[in-house]
C-alpha cells in the first residue's frame, strides 16, 4: 500500500512538472544583410587588392573581426524588449489571438504613461521617419497553402501604434521589408518573413537611445504575504 502511494505521488509530481514546463508560443524572425551589388569601379579596386596572395589572410581576418551587421538591433513587442542575436534572430512570446500583426521601423517612439511606470500605449514622434507594415497570414483556398502577406500600412492620424506592433528601433531607410507573399505553415508559433539590414545602420546610437526606455521593460517585482498555511503572491 505504501509503495502504491509513493508511486502515485511520483506520477502526480511529474505531471505537475510537465504542465508547468509547457513553453509559450513564440513570434520568430531573422534579420539578414541586405545584398550589396558592387559597382564596376569598386569591383576593379577589390580585384587589384586580392591579386597579392599574401593579403588574402589579412582581409579575411578583418572581415571576421568586423562587427556583425545583423546583431544587436533592438526591437519591442507586447511589453518585451530584446535585441537580435549573432545570427540575426529576434524572438518574442506570441500574444496574438489572430494570425496578423503590425511592424514598425523607426528610431524614436514615445511612451504614454498610464500610472507610475505603466505604459498605456506607444506613440510615434513628430517629424521622425517611420515605416509601418501589416503582416497577415492567409490561406490559398484552392491548394490549402498558407502564406504571409506583407503590405505597407498608412500611419495612424493620432500617431498611436497598434497594440500588436513589433517595433524595430532603426531608421526606416536602413531596413528593407520585402512586400508581398512568403510561404508558411499554420502554427501557433509565427515564423515571419526575413527582414534585411542595410549598411550604415547606427546601432550604437540606437542602443544609447534604448537606455532612455529600458526602465519601462524591467521585470515585474513580486511580493509575498505570509498566511498561516501558505504564502500569497502579490504584485506591488
Image: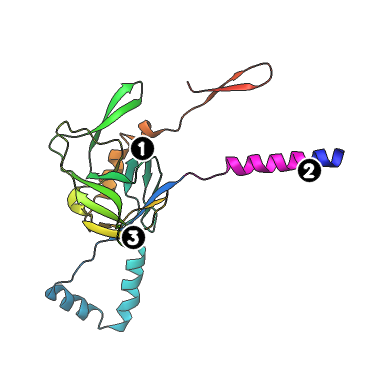
Which label lies toward us, 1 or 3?
Answer: 3
Camera-nearest residue between 180 and 233: 180
| x then y, percent, for residue 49 | 23, 78
Label 1 close to label 2 by CB (< 8 Å):
no
| x then y, percent, for residue 118 | 36, 25
Give the mark nearer the N terminus: 1 vs 3. Answer: 1
Q: How many neighbours does mark 1 have within 10 angstroms: few (below 14), some (14-19), or many (20 or more)?
A: some
Q: Which residue is mark 2?
A: 7
Is residue 76 on the magenta stretch?
Answer: no
Give the mark nearer the N terminus: 1 vs 2. Answer: 2
Q: Residue at x 36, y 31 (%)?
A: 216
| x then y, percent, for residue 178 | 22, 57
Query: For residue 60, which quarter of the picture?
Result: bottom left
**Position of 35 compared to 76: left or right?**
left
Q: Which residue is mark 3?
A: 145
**Position of 95 compared to 166: left or right?**
right
The alpha-carbon separation of the residues under discs 3 and 2 comes to: 47 Å
Camera-nearest residue between 138 and 83: 138
Magenta region: which residues?
8-24
Q: How many neighbours does mark 2 have within 10 angstroms: few (below 14), some (14-19), or many (20 or more)?
A: few
Helix, strand or loop for disc 1: loop
The alpha-carbon separation of the residues under discs 1 and 3 comes to: 29 Å
| x then y, percent, for residue 165 | 29, 41
Give the mark nearer the N terminus: 3 vs 2. Answer: 2
Q: How is the image coloured?
A: rainbow
Label 1 close to label 3 by CB (< 8 Å):
no
Is residue 15 on the magenta stretch?
Answer: yes
Amino acid at each position: 500500500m505504501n509503495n502504491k502511494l509513493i508511486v502515485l505521488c511520483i506520477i502526480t509530481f511529474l505531471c505537475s512538472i510537465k504542465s508547468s514546463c509547457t513553453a509559450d508560443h513564440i513570434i520568430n524572425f531573422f534579420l539578414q544583410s541586405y545584398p550589396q551589388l558592387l559597382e564596376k569601379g569598386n569591383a576593379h579596386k577589390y580585384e587589384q587588392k586580392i591579386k597579392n596572395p599574401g593579403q588574402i589572410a589579412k582581409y579575411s581576418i578583418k572581415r571576421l573581426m568586423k562587427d556583425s551587421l545583423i546583431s544587436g538591433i533592438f526591437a519591442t513587442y507586447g511589453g518585451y524588449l530584446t535585441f537580435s542575436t549573432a545570427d540575426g534572430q529576434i524572438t518574442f512570446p506570441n500574444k496574438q489571438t489572430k494570425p496578423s500583426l503590425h511592424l514598425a521601423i523607426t528610431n524614436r517612439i514615445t511612451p504614454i504613461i498610464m500610472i507610475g511606470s505603466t505604459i498605456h500605449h506607444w506613440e510615434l514622434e513628430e517629424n521622425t521617419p517611420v515605416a509601418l507594415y501589416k503582416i497577415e497570414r492567409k490561406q490559398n483556398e484552392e491548394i490549402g497553402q498558407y502564406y504571409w502577406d506583407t503590405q505597407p500600412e498608412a500611419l495612424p492620424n493620432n500617431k498611436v501604434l497598434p497594440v500588436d506592433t513589433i517595433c524595430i528601433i532603426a531608421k526606416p531607410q536602413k531596413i528593407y521589408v520585402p512586400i508581398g507573399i512568403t510561404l508558411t505553415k499554420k502554427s501557433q508559433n509565427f515564423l515571419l518573413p526575413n527582414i534585411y539590414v542595410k549598411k550604415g545602420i547606427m546601432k550604437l546610437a540606437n542602443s544609447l537611445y534604448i537606455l532612455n526606455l529600458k526602465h519601462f521593460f524591467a521585470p515585474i517585482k513580486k511580493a509575498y504575504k505570509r498566511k498561516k498555511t501558505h504564502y500569497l503572491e502579490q504584485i506591488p
